[in-house]
Amino acid sequence: MQKQIVLGECEVSMGCSMRAYEQQTIEEVVASAKHGNDEAMEYVLAKYKGLVRGLSRTLFLLDGDEDDLIQEGMIGLYKAVVSYDECRGAAFETFASHCINRQMYSAVKKSNRKKTGLLILIFQSIQPVIAIMNRDRTASSCWIVCRQVCIKIQRTLLLTEKKPVI
């Protein structure tokens, strides 16, 4: 048996036109989407896509493009709709902004962890070369460049508080 929730003049199970959603408060539309109304969910996602785009402009996702970060933000927006509780007193837009930011920051952190792992791998790969070059300094220019790269990687790893295992 399908639930019928009445919000204003519109029944959720019957579906509403987009204009009907514009006449409702966003909290009512979110409640409708939360109870399984796909049209209401689409309306909320479309309405707040601009917010997601705006929040994504301040972040950078390593090995990804702008669309990947926007997609993460849309996932955060979806989670906001599903977990929004009007009784807690926060406006939906405020709650959604926090959820979107959290989801995008998590994606950026995950991306940075991959970068740090790659730097550790490079550092470990260069170490035997450095050891050989320390014994035989005939290729001095190559040795200097390799040593500089190794030092830069080491500094980057120290900044991220990751220690390479040598």
Image (tube, rainbow, N blue to C red):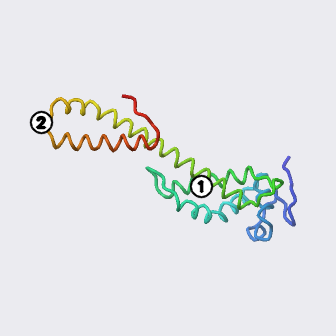
Answer with the quarter of the image where residue 133 lies: top left
Quadrant placement of the C terminus = top left
Tell me if residue 36 comes above or below residue 153 in the rendering. Answer: below
The residue lying toward the viewer, choosing from 89 and 81, is 89
Tell me if residue 127 comes above or below residue 116 in the rendering. Answer: above
Q: What residue type is labelled 1?
A: Gly
> Which residue is situated farthest in the left direction here?
138
Residue at point 87%, 59% (across, down)? 6
Q: Which of marks 1 and 2 is nearer the N terminus?
A: 1
Residue at point 70%, 53% (across, down)? 80
- Residue 134 % position (x, y): 20, 32
Left or right: 55 as drawn, with respect to 9: left
Element assignment for label 1: helix
Residue at point 27%, 44% (across, down)? 148
Q: Residue 73 carries which label?
A: 1
Residue at point 65%, 63% (across, down)? 48
Q: Distance between the residues labelled 1 and 2?
A: 53 Å
Element assignment for label 2: loop
Left or right: 157 as drawn, with respect to 7: left
- Residue 60 % position (x, y): 48, 55
The residue lying toward the viewer, choosing from 164 and 82, is 164
Answer with the quarter of the image where residue 142 lies: top left
- Residue 40 % position (x, y): 74, 60
Q: Which mark is residue 101?
A: none
Neighbour tally class for label 2: few under 14, some 14-19, many 20 plus, Cα within 10 Å: few
Q: Which amino acid does label 2 sit on?
A: Thr
The residue lying toward the viewer, choosing from 14 and 128, is 128
- Residue 149 % position (x, y): 29, 43
The residue lying toward the viewer, choosing from 41 and 123, is 123
Where does label 2 land, which residue?
Answer: 138
Q: Which of marks 1 and 2 is in front?
A: 2
Left or right: 43 as drawn, with respect to 162: right
